Amino acid sequence: MHITLFREDLLQPLQMVMGVVERRQTLPILSHVLLNVEDGMLQITATDLEVELQARIKLVHPAENSQITVPGRKLVDICRSLPDEAEVSLTLDKQQVTLKSGRSRFTLSTLPAEEFPFVEGEAANAEFNLPQNLLKEHIEHIQFAMAQQDVRYYLNGMLWQVGNGKFTNVATDGHRLALAEHSLDLGLSELCQVIVPRKGIIELGRLLEVSDDHVTVKIGTNHLIIDADSFTFTSKLIDGRFPDYQKVLPKAGNNILICDKEVIKQALVRASVLTNEKYRGVRFELSQNNLHITANNPEQEQAEDELEVNYSGDDLTVGFNVGYLIDVLNAINETQVKFTLSDTNAGVLVEAADNPDYTYVVMPMRL
């Protein structure tokens, strides 16, 4: 192997795949990235055995087809340390790769490319194209609601549902739920549901660009594959049944609160200062066009805030986890937010006042 390219051209695809390269690995090969030169393209692949990322870049200078693995973190740190306009050459000599740039020279150990483990996909049950920016928007709006290391393993990821003229993503940890849904005819005759693990979702959100360019989505029995011009993302799926999210969505509510998102968010941030660190509860007291927010802690300290809002409905007093409400408000980009409540025992439905594509549910707390 001998390739020559600019530092930035090597660093960019390296950074795309480094999210799945762990510093401490029981298998040494998993701390390596696979460099594969084929037909004038450099492919850089990394995996943690659950998620596989492959980034691609066209080589300016011709190079023979070859492949080798090198320590990923060391290679990316070396590239970051080089001057911006530096030219880099990589040469394989016996069991080592030599990297040269100007008067700098680095020698890295390698492992055989044949030992590199791929996340093997299978034939796709469903295949369709999506705009990158739509998929990125879905992930950014709802990923905060995914569970983390929950014993209910099927919550540690995001539901992907395709069919019936809609593309839907759902995330929940049992205390709050986030739903993103767009009407799209993707040409699928049957409803398809899979759960993509949390780590894969976070990495995919990082890879996707705000672009109208389309990606190809392939859903198999055990894998999800997403192909873009500059990368291929492969993830194993969670083998489980996602909760019926439709049952969680409040069907009706006569108590409607509409207010400025930033105003209520800042009031909640202020109240959170004096919440109980363990339970994080705040109390909403709603009356005609008025919202009274209070928070207490075991030290008998109290925070109060009163907002003039657009509220119509019954007088209500209900408690919520302040952190969950702030997370929802941070995910909403619009200026006006709408809360729909039915009673003190049901979850509150939160959405932008003029954007029905993203819906959130936060369950109440007893204070």
Image (cartoon, rainbow, N blue to C red):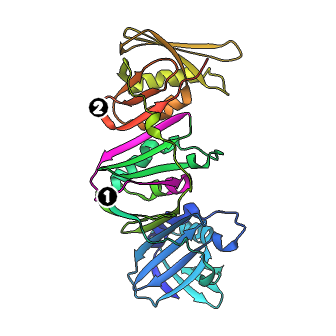
Question: Which residue, as the protein is rendered here, is positioned at the far front?
Answer: 190
Q: Is residue 60 left or right of residue 365?
A: left
Q: Is residue 20 left or right of residue 354?
A: right
Relative to 362, say whether 29 is above or below. Answer: below
User: Of callouts 2 and 1, which one flags the residue occurring earlier in the amino acid sequence?
Assistant: 1
Q: Nearer the viewer, mark 2 or mark 1?
A: 1
Give 107 or 203, whichever is nearer the viewer. 203
Identify the residue at image location x=38%, y=24%: 252
Residue 236 occupies quadrant: bottom right
Q: Amino acid at mark 1?
A: Ser
Relative to 241, say whether 265 is above or below. Answer: above
Identify the residue at image location x=56%, y=52%: 240
Relative image position of residue 122 (x, y in whole percent): 48, 71
The reply to whether the magenta stretch includes residue 284 is no
Q: Is residue 156 left or right of residue 231?
A: right
Relative to 203, say whether 150 is above or below. Answer: above
Q: From the image, tell me which residue sits under label 2.
A: 354
The residue tagged with tag 1: helix, strand or loop?
loop
Identify the residue at image location x=64%, y=63%: 22
**Distance from Cα at disc 2 to Cα at disc 1:** 31 Å
Q: From the image, tell me which residue sits under label 1.
A: 189
The reply to whether the magenta stretch includes residue 180 is yes
Give 174 or 334, whichever is nearer the viewer. 174
Relative image position of residue 70 (x, y in whole percent): 61, 77
Give 138 or 272, whichever is nearer the viewer. 138
CB within 8 Å, label 2 to label 1: no
Residue 111 occupies quadrant: bottom right
Q: Alpha-carbon neighbours of circle 1 within 10 Å: few (<14), some, or many (≥20)?
A: few
Question: What range of the chain is rendered magenta?
Answer: 175-203
Relative image position of residue 251 (x, y in whole percent): 39, 28
The residue tagged with tag 2: helix, strand or loop?
loop
